[in-house]
Image (cartoon, rainbow, N blue to C red):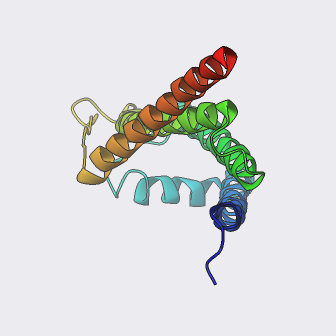
Amino acid sequence: MALSPHVRVKSISRKMKLLIVLAAAGFVSGSAYLTWIFVFDIGRLKELVIHYPLSGIEPVTLTSYALGGLAIIASANAILIGTAIWTLWTMFDHFEKGEIFAGRSGVLLRRTGYLALIGGFSGLLSRTLAVLVATYENPLGQTMLSIGISSTDIGLLILAGLLFVLGHIMVIATGIEEDNRSFV
């Protein structure tokens, strides 16, 4: 027996909301862990910074200014991720309620694409700034600037642009539909 489209959309939306909850839980857990080691085990934090975001780039002189700069970069990205999680949750909540082609759903889809575009560019910029900030206090001639873009980054930007455009088209289509209803 085939399910109606609304039932399928409702089911998919519930599953996506569960996935968003799991992603949010992982994000909060990771943030709490980083805050914990920042407060209680700064040596471990320095080790993590050198090996993960900086890919083992050495030498690195992690002064308090460098850690502060890295914390600012991480905080900006955390705000972006939190906003994206909230936007996705709201969008799938609208879909679950059957408001698939409502104007608000188009706005949320466009906002999701916009946040993904910002996230894509933020990822490129954050990696570059993290390496520069972490090596800024190195001796003369050992400061590094690492700029890199991968096919994953390009794919993310293309998909983000597609989400943004589809959301924008939904908003325009909703406006046209409302105009057409006013004539009848």
* Left/right of residue 180 with respect to residue 147 in the rendered view: right
For residue 123, what is the image quadrant?
top left
Residue at 37%, 31% (x, y): give it.
136
Q: How many marks?
A: 0
Q: Is residue 98 visible?
A: yes
Q: Quadrant of the N terminus?
A: bottom right
Relative image position of residue 153 (x, y in whole percent): 32, 47
Identify which residue, 50 or 92, lies in the foreground.
Answer: 92
Q: Quadrant of the C terminus?
A: top right
In the image, is residue 182 above or below residue 62? above
In the image, is residue 28 above or below residue 136? below
Q: Is residue 58 visible?
A: no
* Left/right of residue 142 with respect to residue 12 in the rendered view: left
Residue at 51%, 59% (x, y): give it.
48
Identify which residue, 129 or 151, lies in the foreground.
Answer: 151
Residue at 38%, 45% (x, y): give it.
159
Identify which residue, 44 or 105, lies in the foreground.
Answer: 105
* Left/right of residue 94 with respect to residue 162 in the rendered view: right
Relative image position of residue 29 (x, y in whole percent): 71, 61
In the image, is residue 111 above or below residue 43? above
Relative image position of residue 85 (x, y in whole percent): 66, 47
For residue 41, what is the image quadrant?
bottom right
Residue at 71%, 60% (x, y): give it.
17
- Can you name the residue that lies furthest to the right here? 97
- Can you name the residue that lies furthest to the front here? 184
- Can you name the residue that lies furthest to the bottom here? 1
